[in-house]
Image (cartoon, grey):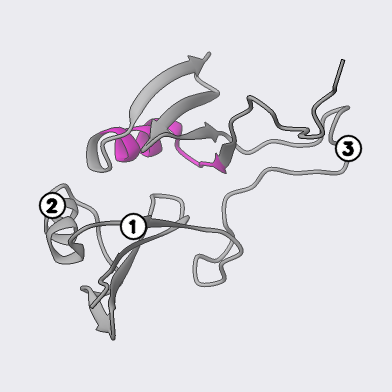
Amino acid sequence: MHESRDPFQGSEITTILVTSDLEKSKDFYLQALGASLFREYGGDSAVIQLMGHWILLVKPGGPTDDKPGTYFKTPGNKEVVSHSFTIRVNNCWQSYEILSGRGVEFITPPISRGNETRCFFYDPDGHLFEISEYRID
């Protein structure tokens, strides 16, 4: 029997986002971004799906036996980014208008640079998102 050399065969990836207010974050993702709720875990976390991507919203927490010395915290300073999401859209201005109408606050309106138009927003805890349109001439 030939064993697969792919350690992730049949797997999916989930991003964990630490939130200071689970209900506020859950509402943001479900109402403003159109995510769907997959499951909740006793008020401590929620699994959502956004455009086929799994996101686990969790409250801050300390080390466990399987991750000693590791702390889950919300971003300390939203202006210093180590992780962000980029959402490719067909029409950046249209997406901007729809999301703005749902209460999403953008850092700036869309800005065009050559073939790309993009803009950025934060979730309630400061996790950075970009919407980006790329046009091929």
| Label 1 with label 2: CB-CB less than 8 Å | no
| Label 3 with label 2: CB-CB less than 8 Å | no
Mark 2 neighbour class, 10 Å CA radius: few under 14, some 14 to 19, many 20 or more: some
Position of the C terminus, as image quadrant, is bottom left
Position of the N terminus, as image quadrant, is top right
Q: Which residue is mark 1?
A: 88
Write down the quadrant of residue 66 in the picture: top right
Q: Secondary structure at mark 1?
A: strand
Name the amino acid type tagged 3.
Pro
Identified at 25% across, 60% down, the residue is 105
Structural distance between the alpha carbons of marks 3 and 1: 36 Å
Magenta extent = 17-30
Give coordinates of residue 31: x percent, y percent. Answer: 23, 35
Helix, strand or loop: magenta stretch: helix
Mark 1 neighbour class, 10 Å CA radius: few under 14, some 14 to 19, many 20 or more: few
Give the mark toward the camera: 1 or 2: 1
Q: Nearer the viewer, residue 118 or 82?
A: 118
Q: Is residue 20 magenta?
A: yes
Identified at 21% across, 58% down, the residue is 90
